[in-house]
Amino acid sequence: MRTALVLGAGGLTGQAFHLGVLAALADVTGFDSRTADVVVGTSAGSLVAAALTAGFTAADQAAMLHGDALSPEAAARLRSLRSKASDLPLLEEEAAPAGRGPLAPGALLAAARRPWGVRPGAVMSGLLPPGRNTTHAISRGITHLHGQDWPGNQLRICAVRARDARRVVFGTPTAPEVDVGTAVAASCAIPGYFSPVYVDGQAYVDGGAHSPTNADVVRRDEPDLVVISSPMSFAPGRGARTPDAVIRIAVRRYLAREVRLLRRQGATVIVFQPSPTDLAAMGLNPMRLLKGPDIVRTAAATVTARLEARPELVEQLRQR
């Protein structure tokens, strides 16, 4: 069975949600997210995806995030990676762009030429001024995990090319060749907040500007099972009552279209979205790292309860 894992955008709270979901899947069903045939990451999801494909479980990622003890396997791997870190080339900081004009005013013209080919959020990302905050720490941290090598055909990282507002999926044949650290930094470069990441002279920004999940990317891989973690939408129920409901409804609609495409192709799709309990733990500020431990625990408990109530899901995940 060919399996795909899709990890959506959502900031630091979204990263914690992913880790709670994946930890529960491993505990209840034995689903090892590191062994998925394809792993797609967008923004916060790209951080988790990169660490998974470097061999770190969700439980160990959560431990690293919160300063807890790692498993012996992860501790040994981390020591090995740190010993090699001195051999990696130093990354140069991108200079903050001068002026406060739009990053890519031509994105509007590109959208007018082919309005069916771009998303409004991607166009808007090019019309905002470049952010002032560097993604250097992100790229450096991921480079310590992967070095200059790309992990085969397993990993896909989504970003948006500012010039024409088009999605680019690093790790696919049509995308520029980059190291994983650069790709993840580009995918996390929130428009207007982070400086764009340049590859071959082109500016790239957060892949969530095209879609917060980008689940349709795996259609070309024709997976039998697709597992999606979507921190920016919400599960059926009372989620629409939250103050950020308008955004979450829009994200859920994007996701629903992507899921329909996958199911028409014959894939079994299992989606994990925040429940009302998860939303209460996550709050409204997606960059609030201090809430991470609570979010991981809450998401793990929510997913565990869902799986216990839906034994058919457990069976589908165990069959992979």
Image (cartoon, rainbow, N blue to C red):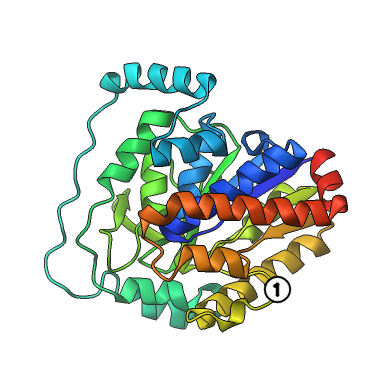
The residue positioned 38% from the left and 40% from the top of the image is 181
State the image coordinates of residue 297 (x, y, percent, origin top left): 55, 50
Eyeballing the image, is 127 above or below 138? below
Q: Nearer the viewer, residue 260 or 119?
A: 260
User: Who is closer to the viewer here, 202 or 225?
Assistant: 225
Amino acid type for the residue under numbered disc 1: Pro
Kindly indicate the quadrant of the structure image that contains residue 310: bottom right
- Could you tell whether 190 is left or right of 216 in the image? left
- Residue found at the far left of this picture: 98
Q: Is residue 163 left or right of residue 156?
A: left
In the image, residue 34 lies at what x, y percent? 62, 35
Q: How many marks?
A: 1
**Image point (80%, 51%), residue name:** 308
Tell me what residue is drawn at x 41 percent, y 64 percent. 286
Provide residue 113's location: percent of width, then percent of height. Answer: 47, 80
Residue 298 at x, y percent in the picture: 57, 55
Look at the image and tell me in which quarter the C terminus lies.
top right
The residue nearer to you, when weighing 16 against 147, is: 16
Determine if residue 53 is in view.
yes
Which is more toward the observer, 163 or 195? 195
Label 1 belongs to which residue? 236
Q: Residues within 10 Å of mark 1 (few under 14, many from 20)?
A: few
Q: For residue 279, which quarter of the picture?
A: bottom right
Q: Which residue is pictured at 26% across the width and 27% down the height?
A: 89
Task: Determine the secondary structure under disc 1.
Answer: loop
Q: Quadrant of residue 209?
A: bottom left
Does residue 105 sit above or below 291 in this rendering? below
Residue 115 seen anywhere in this rendered image of the structure? no
Would you place residue 52 above or below residue 78 in this image? below
Q: Is residue 185 left or right of residue 244?
A: left
